[in-house]
Image (spheres, rainbow, N blue to C red):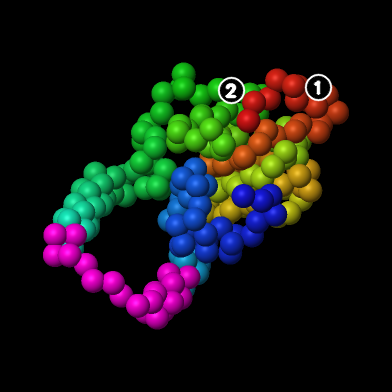
Amino acid sequence: MTASLSIEELIAGHAAGRLPEPVAMVVATHLSLSPSSRRLYDGFNEVGGVLLEGVEPSPMAISSFARISALLDDRALDEERTGRLLGRSSRWPSPLADYVADQLPEDRWRHFGSGSELEIETGSLDFRVRLIRVKAGRAVPKHTHGGFEVTVVLEGAYRDQFGRFGPGDIEIADGDIDHQPIAEPERDCYCLAVTDAPLRLTGRFSRFLNPFIKM
């Protein structure tokens, strides 16, 4: 994936099933929180359906059809069961809730000056996914990016020189962006972020910590 991405490209890639799992999970979380992006996603799916109508169908064996139908029935049942279990009481959107528990033990978080982060295991060696908690009114260290970063706000809000980002909002950053997000003072800000390369700290003193930053 390239660093110069747009939200529309990410949503189109997700609709086409082309995104790596860690990126797809973050984009799906955004879609679950943003009605306008869901409408765009539905539009991409409709276009894909129209294109498929022009494809010459191939005969399918009865046994193959039965296996696919069973899989679809099982998936629908799983989704229904998951919806009942999570419902409105789940803290996290369902795409994220598939990876983390509703309540996360404090000792799982790695703390830094203005907040903490939790590594989310996706099985990928190429991407890093983190749940980030920034204390109310505090700023994360000023940084740029060795690759790209896609961030979705889950709770609270933050601001940087590009604007305000609240629940469901998504920000895409790369090496051309040097910013310092600051959580709004009313409450802690929780974000979900995926990166394909380490961040590079650019603050006057914190940049000396760059050799110790992992992807």
Viewer-proximal residue, 198 or 154?
198
Residue 41 in view of the camera: yes
Instruction: Give the dominant element type of the magenta stretch: helix, strand or loop.
Output: helix
Residue at image point 86% right, 28% down: 204
| Up/down of 83 relative to 105, above or below | below
Q: Is residue 33 above or below residue 86?
A: below
The residue where tag 1 is placed is 208
Structural crowding at the residue carrying mark 1, measured as other residues with C-alpha within 10 Å and reported as few (<14), some (14–19) or many (≥20): few
User: Considering only order in the chain, which callout, 1 or 2, is on the residue closer to the N terminus?
Assistant: 2
Q: Does residue 184 appear left or right of residue 207 in this picture?
A: left
Residue furthest right as drawn: 204
Kind of residue sitting beneath label 1:
Phe
**Mark 2 surroundings within 10 Å by alpha-carbon count, few (fewer than 14), some (14 through 19), many (20 or more):** some
Secondary element under disc 2, as helix, strand or loop, is: strand
* Residue located 72% across and 47% down the image: 174
- Count of number-bearing discs: 2
Q: Position of residue 183 (x, y in %)?
A: 64, 41
> Is residue 56 one of those drawn in magenta?
yes
> Which secondary structure, mark 1?
helix
Q: Determine which residue is flagged by label 2.
A: 111
Q: Give the magenta range.
A: 44-64
Q: Is residue 154 shown in magenta?
A: no
Per the rendering, the mark at residue 61 is none
What is the spatial separation of the Cα atoms under label 2 and label 1, in whole angstroms? 18 Å
For badge 2, the amino acid type reads His
Is residue 31 something one can see in this rendering? no
